[in-house]
Amino acid sequence: MVRQITQTGISVFVLIMALYTNTAGAHGKVAMEEDSCMRRIGENMIHLSTYQPQVAEDGHYCTDIPKAGNAILVIDLVDPALRDMPIGIKVIKGSKADEGETIAHIRSAVYQDGVINTQSAFDQGKYLVLVTAEGVPPLNYEYHLRVEMINYAQVFRASIGPVVGLLLTTILGYKLIRSRRFREWMASRGSKKN
């Protein structure tokens, strides 16, 4: 009986750990095509990185910026063809291009090194970063930023493993306590003490 309980407990523990560690995927360990900071139009790709050195020196964010304040936006022109086109950037407060206030604007220019960076001050809320490549036809990339906002989907994904593990442990404990063998085993332990 004790052996069965131990085996079941180990199985539940392994299941919980497997579920929990799978939810902790880091940004830097995904393929370029699956990276949420990557935008693609046809064969043309760009990548956005956001940094807040005052919050975390090595912190690298994509669309969820942890604190209001200054942030450095770095856009990498992954496709070499984009390095020969004029590229312009607008940062708009709000989630729609035609309704928000422009807080930063970089005029179109050619970036031979493939890196565009700018620094902006962000309040809490939603922002839109528009990157326009003046090719034929023009290419328009959008990034929706969330500054100092809770990402409920991420919280849910991070908590699902422990919740499932707790549920399984509770069900297992209930089944164990209700089992006839466990009651007989407990009764025999009680009679041995007397």
Image: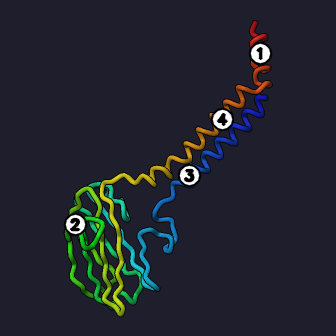
SS at mark 1 in the image:
helix
Q: CA distance from mark 3 to mark 2?
A: 35 Å
Which residue in the structure is indicated by mark 3? 21
Q: Residue furthest front?
A: 99
Question: What is the C-alpha distance between the residues marked 1 and 3?
Answer: 40 Å
Is disc 2 placed on a helix, strand or loop?
strand
Q: Give, as a three-letter code, the residue at label 1.
A: Ala
Where is residue 70, by image quadrant? bottom left
| Residue 7 on image: x %, y % | 74, 38
Quick one: label 2, few (<14), some, or many (20+) residues within 10 Å?
some
The tag on residue 116 is none
- Quadrant location of the N terminus? top right
Q: Tell me which residue sits at (33%, 64%) in the image.
A: 145
Residue at 21% from the left image edge and 63% from the top image edge: 121
In the rendered image, which residue does mark 2 sit on?
120
Q: Which residue in the rendered view is the most extreme toward the top?
A: 194
* Image location (x, y in percent) of residue 180: 79, 24
- Residue on which the image places disc 4: 171
- Identify the mark nearer the N-term, 2 or 1: 2
Q: CA distance from mark 3 to mark 4?
A: 22 Å
Towards the viewer: 8 or 111: 8
Q: Residue at x 62, y 34 (%)?
A: 170
Q: Amino acid at mark 2?
A: Ser
